[in-house]
Amino acid sequence: MSDAPGTSIEPQIEELISLIKRNHGFDFSDYSRASLRRRLSRIMMLKKLTFDELNHALVDEPHFFQWFLEEITVNVTEMFRDPSFYKALNTDVLPYLSNFQHIRIWSAGCSSGEEVYSLAILLKEAGLNHKSFIYGTDINNEVLNEARKGTYSLRKIKSYVENYRLSGFSSLLTEHFIVMNEVANIHNELKQNTLFSVHNLVSDNVFNEFQLISCRNVFIYFEAKLQEKILELFYNSLSPSGILCLGSKETIRFHGFKNKFKVINQKENIYQKIG
């Protein structure tokens, strides 16, 4: 995304945001501009497009927009990412959740499902999977299709083994998969208590009441105004004394929410709804 010296690409980005909202109904106006610039640069480099050509492709080629949406919204993910977070869930949160007859969990911005299945494995190891249900949502239906399959390359699973061990488990990660021909399929007993569906954090509303919401490493892509709006959505979606988990570089920093949550684990950004 190159421009003449002294010129700014901000007007072009704002024009692109308006075009996408007008033609496709997706609103990126409160997304982090730094993140948008990086991802737009990558898209234009991959497809060898100018800004004008990108605009035309987004209007005239429906298949291109679907691909563009995947590239602009995809989140980096892996199983048991940040092992200390899963250890904290095990020690600080699961004993509380075990008191519920039914445990509903929302993994927001779940991408291709690694976090959802990590949570399912954690619950199984704690003996809670039978009474738990995990909703995984994302704006990107293509990655949700991957999540629904629960199928990952054996190479990927091997790369997650150390995360799993550092999360405090003594069993083998592969025990939770059926491995065939360099492909690992998540066990049906873990998959059957999950549901993956499209949900837009920017525009969609509360759709259930949850004992735990995990939205990790998603806020970093949003401007402060949108972060605050989504926090309101999460607050209204949590049951009384429900748990909210944010990413390692994220926090509840808005004054209006500091009185609505108490800190369960400051290092891992785990909070509990007050009231």
Image (cartoon, helix red, strand yellow):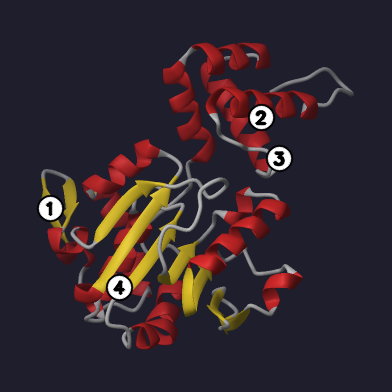
Can residue 124 be seen by looking at this rendering?
A: no
Residue 122 numbered tag? 4
Answer with mark 3 or mark 1, whichever residue precedes in sequence. Answer: 3
Q: Which amino acid does label 4 sit on?
A: Leu
Few, some or many residues within 10 Å of mark 4 (<14, 14–19, 20+) = many
Circle 1 is placed at which residue position? 179
Answer with mark 3 or mark 4, whichever residue precedes in sequence. Answer: 3
Circle 2 is placed at which residue position? 17
Residue 261 numbered tag? none
SS state under label 4: helix
Q: In this view, does 49 lie to the left or right of 93?
A: right
Percent x, y of residue 181: 11, 43
Answer with mark 3 or mark 2, whichever residue precedes in sequence. Answer: 2
The CA distance from mark 3 to mark 2 is 11 Å
Q: What residue type is labelled 2?
A: Ile
| Residue beneath the point at 73% across and 67% down | 254
Front residue of 152 and 115: 115
SS state under label 1: strand
Q: In this view, does 196 lie above or below 134?
A: above
Q: Is residue 137 left or right of residue 262?
A: left
Front residue of 160 and 96: 96
The CA distance from mark 4 to mark 1 is 20 Å
| Residue beneath the point at 89% across and 24% down | 6
